[in-house]
Amino acid sequence: MSPSRTDFLTGVRASVPIVAASAPFALLFGALAVDNGLSVGEAVLMSALLFAGASQMVGLELFSSGIAPWIIVFSVFAVNFRHVLYSAALGRRMGLMPGWRKAVAFFFLTDPQYASAETRADGGKPLSFAWYMGMAVPIYLFWVLGGFLGAVFGRLITDPEAIGLDALLPIYFLGLVLGFRQRSGWLPVVIASGLASIAAYHTVGSPWHVSLGALAGVIVAVLLPPVPDTAGSAPAAREEAS
Amino acid sequence: MNGDFWGLPVNVWIIFAAAVVTYATRVGGHMMLSRMRSIPPRVDAALNAVPAAVLATLVAPAAVSNGSAEAITLAVCLVIGLRLPMMGMFAIGWALVVALRAWGL
């Protein structure tokens, strides 16, 4: 097998737990979309074009409240603002991808995609387009399919809380946070982000707690004394240090 | 939201605009950073902190605001997540939150 084919299949394998973990949310999104007055086609269109679960859920809540369109669009932007940070952090590691492929890859930059790409780069493996799309394509297809099925059969899930669906995302994100615990400054960064997000959640409100909390963690990371040759540093930084 | 605009429902226009701003967040960070020649160590340290910093904000408010079943579940998951791989922690956490809610928490 060619190396790119092997990379693609490695990516597909990495997508399996994400597909399993996101399937309930894909279905839930479709069901809630129809509940909030979207057509099945609009629900599928939203999953296919945004491909960003949390912001889709926030958008739905606003659709039903008859709020001004620009506020819905701005709220989606606010929820997705964390991607600016992902994009800046991951762009450093996409040196192997030519421009148009990078532009395609960024469309698929979700939370788990970003976390897995960082983990792969930490492990010294190439962040190739084949691996990246091997992971992204199944997640995308099942996300859109789940949204469609949820919209069509959504009424079957009568009580999502009883089967714990609403609690799955935080558990999943906690697992991702723990996955980065080898990085320098991890504990102070996580404590700062966690406390700041709780404070912002209760004062400014959602979704701003995400950007403000993350900002607090990043500021702590900048203020911490620099550690040469950390596990998470980019190749460029290693060259400067050596 | 009802009504059409240029032959398409307003909802569809909202979805198009939301898709454009979402893609902008996904390319924007890289486009800003790629104008710098080399990455200063402090900026590099900041970017390395991004995943844990962002993801922690998606967990912490849920742990303190969504009721005791979720709080207990996340605390237990924090402990077992240090020993078990992701999917093991995820499965135990899911079972635990369903059990705690069935129990009335």
Image (tube, coloured by chain):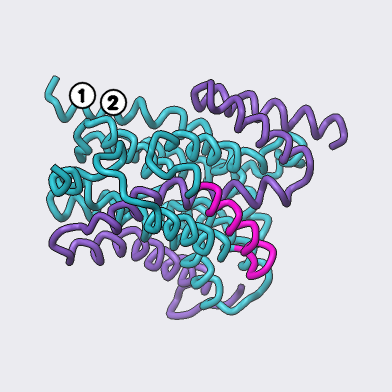
Chain colours: A cyan, B purple
Whether A21 is drawn above or below A87: the answer is above
List x then y, in percent, for residue A67: 63, 76
> Which residue is outermost to the right?
B104
The residue marked by circle 2 belongs to what chain? A
Q: As rendered, which of A105 and A49 lies closer to the eye?
A: A105
Q: Secondary structure at mark 1?
A: helix
- The amino acid sitting under disc 1 is Thr
The residue marked by circle 1 belongs to what chain? A
Mark sitting on residue A6: 1
Q: Residue at x 24, y 62 (%)?
A: B33
Q: Residue at x 63, y 70 (%)?
A: A204
Segment colored magenta: A190-206
Q: As rendered, which of A16 and A145 lies closer to the eye?
A: A16
Mark sitting on residue A10: 2
Q: Are marks 2 and 1 in contact (CB under 8 Å)?
A: yes
> Is A196 within the magenta?
yes
Q: CA distance from mark 2 to mark 1?
A: 6 Å
Q: Residue at x 57, y 62 (%)?
A: A209
List x then y, in percent, for residue A102: 21, 52
* Image side of residue B103 versus residue A24, left or right: right
Q: Please say whether residue B9 is visible from this viewpoint.
A: no
Quadrant of the snapshot with the C terminus of chain B: top right
Q: Residue at x 66, y 39 (%)?
A: A165
List x then y, in percent, for residue A183: 38, 39
In this rendering, do the residues under marks 2 and 1 share a single chain?
yes
Looking at the rendering, which quadrant does residue A181 occupy? top left
Quadrant of the snapshot with the N terminus of chain B: bottom right
List x then y, in percent, for residue A108: 34, 48
